[in-house]
C-alpha cells in the first residue's frame, strides 16, 4: 500500500512539474511557437511556423527582406532605414531563399521593396544548410506543445542569452562588447568555405527572379577581423565569387575587409566584433550606412578584374604574399 502511494505521489509530482514547465513555456514562448508575445526579450529561436508568420506580414504592407546568416542577423529598420523582415530563420542557403521567393503570391511580391542578401562563406554548400519548408500547407500545431529536453533548455537559455529576437526576425544584442586581439584558438568549423556548382545555379535563378519581378537585389558579404581573414582560403574565395559574378549579377559589396573596422584595435581588442566572427550592431550599422546605403563604390565589385584587385589588396593588408593575379 505504501509503495502504491509513493508511485502515485511520484507520478503526480512529475505531472505538476511538467505542467509548470508547460505554462512557463507558453508564457515565455522562447521560439515563437505560440502567437503570444508576452515576454518580448526572451525570444531566442524559431519554431518553423515563424517563417510563415513573417511571410504573412508581406500581405499587410511593404518590407525589405534580409536574407543571410547570423552575420547579418542584426540588420533591421534602424540600419536599413525602412521596414524590414530579417529572414535569418530560413538561413542564407540559395535553395531556401529561392524556395521562399517562388512561393510568394503576387501581392506579397509587390510588397517587397528590396532584397538584401548577405552571401556568407559557407551557405553555398549544396543542400547541407538547406531548410525545407512546405509552404503549401497551413501549420497544424497542437494547442499544447508536447515539451522535450530542447524546449526546457530553450526556456533556461532565454533568460541568459546575450540579446533576443524580435517579431520581425532580427536580433537585438544586449551590448556591443568587443573581443581580445588574441582571441582565437582557430577552429576550421568557424569558417567553412565549401561551395557547389548547383548552389551557384540556384543563385542564378534568384538573380533572374528578382530582375523579372523588378525587385532590387543588393548582395553583400560579411565582414571579418584581419586576424580571422588570415584563415580564409583566398583562392577558393576568388573562385566562388568569380562564378557568382558570372550569374548575371551586376555587382556586390565585398565587405570582407573594411578599413577602420577589420583592423581597428583599441586596448588590445577588435572593437567591431563581439565574438570571433560576428560584428556588433554599432559597426554593422556604420558599414551599411557608409558603403551600402550610400552606394559608395569603394568595395563594390562589378567584374573579375575588380575582384582580383580587391583580394590582392586584402592579402597585402593581412600580411600574406600577394601574387600578380588570383586566376588559376
Image: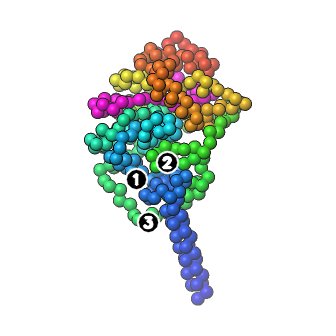
Vertical position of residue 253 compared to residue 102: above or below: above
Would you identify the image quadrant in which residue 9 lies?
bottom right
Image location (x, y in percent) of residue 261: 60, 27
Vertical position of residue 319 compared to residue 112: above or below: above
Q: Residues within 10 Å of mark 2 (few under 14, many from 20)?
A: many
**Distance from the alpha carbon under mark 2 to that under mark 3:** 23 Å
Residue at 46% of width from left, 35% of height from top? Answer: 81
Task: Kindly identify which residue carries mark 2.
Answer: 166
The stretch drawn in magenta includes residue 178:
no
The magenta span reads: 205-234
Vertical position of residue 121 compared to residue 306: above or below: below
Q: Quadrant of the N terminus?
A: bottom right
Would you identify the image quadrant in which residue 262 lies?
top right
Task: Kindly identify which residue carries mark 3.
Answer: 144
Cβ atoms at labels 1 and 3 below 8 Å apart: no
User: N-terminal of the two: label 2 or label 3?
Assistant: 3
SS at mark 3 in the image: loop
Residue at 52% of width from left, 44% of height from top? Answer: 171
SS at mark 1 in the image: helix
Q: Which mark is residue 49?
A: 1
* Tag in front: 2 or 3: 2
User: N-terminal of the two: label 1 or label 2?
Assistant: 1
Horizontal relation, residue 212 to residue 197: left or right: left
Amino acid at each position: 500500500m505504501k509503495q502504491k502511494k509513493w508511485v502515485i505521489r511520484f507520478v503526480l509530482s512529475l505531472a505538476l512539474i511538467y505542467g509548470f514547465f508547460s505554462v512557463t513555456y507558453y508564457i515565455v514562448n522562447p521560439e515563437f511557437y505560440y502567437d503570444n508575445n508576452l515576454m518580448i526579450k526572451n525570444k531566442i529561436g524559431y519554431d518553423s511556423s515563424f517563417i510563415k508568420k513573417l511571410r504573412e506580414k508581406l500581405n499587410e504592407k511593404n518590407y525589405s527582406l534580409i536574407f543571410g546568416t547570423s552575420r547579418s542577423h542584426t540588420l533591421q529598420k534602424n540600419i536599413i532605414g525602412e521596414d524590414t523582415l530579417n529572414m535569418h530563420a530560413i538561413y542564407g542557403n540559395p535553395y531556401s531563399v529561392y524556395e521562399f521567393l517562388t512561393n510568394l503570391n503576387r501581392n506579397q511580391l509587390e510588397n517587397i521593396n528590396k532584397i538584401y542578401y548577405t552571401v556568407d562563406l559557407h551557405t553555398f554548400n549544396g543542400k547541407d544548410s538547406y531548410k525545407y519548408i512546405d509552404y503549401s500547407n497551413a501549420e497544424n500545431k497542437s494547442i499544447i506543445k508536447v515539451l522535450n529536453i530542447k524546449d526546457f533548455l530553450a526556456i533556461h537559455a532565454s533568460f541568459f542569452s546575450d540579446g533576443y529576437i524580435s517579431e520581425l526576425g532580427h536580433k537585438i544584442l544586449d551590448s556591443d562588447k568587443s573581443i581580445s586581439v588574441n582571441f582565437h584558438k582557430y577552429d576550421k568549423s568557424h569558417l567553412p568555405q565549401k561551395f557547389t556548382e548547383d548552389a551557384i545555379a540556384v543563385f542564378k535563378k534568384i538573380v533572374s527572379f528578382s530582375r523579372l519581378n523588378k525587385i532590387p537585389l543588393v548582395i553583400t558579404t560579411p565582414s571579418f577581423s584581419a586576424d580571422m581573414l588570415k584563415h580564409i582560403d583566398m583562392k577558393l574565395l576568388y573562385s566562388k565569387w568569380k562564378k557568382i559574378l558570372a550569374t548575371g549579377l551586376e555587382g556586390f559589396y565585398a565587405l570582407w575587409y573594411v578599413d577602420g573596422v577589420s583592423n581597428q584595435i583599441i586596448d588590445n581588442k577588435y572593437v567591431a566584433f563581439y565574438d570571433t566572427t560576428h560584428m556588433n550592431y554599432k559597426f554593422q550599422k556604420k558599414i551599411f550606412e557608409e558603403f551600402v546605403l550610400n552606394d559608395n563604390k569603394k568595395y563594390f565589385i562589378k567584374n573579375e578584374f575588380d575582384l582580383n584587385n580587391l583580394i590582392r589588396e586584402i592579402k597585402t593588408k593581412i600580411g600574406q604574399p600577394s601574387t600578380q593575379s588570383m586566376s588559376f
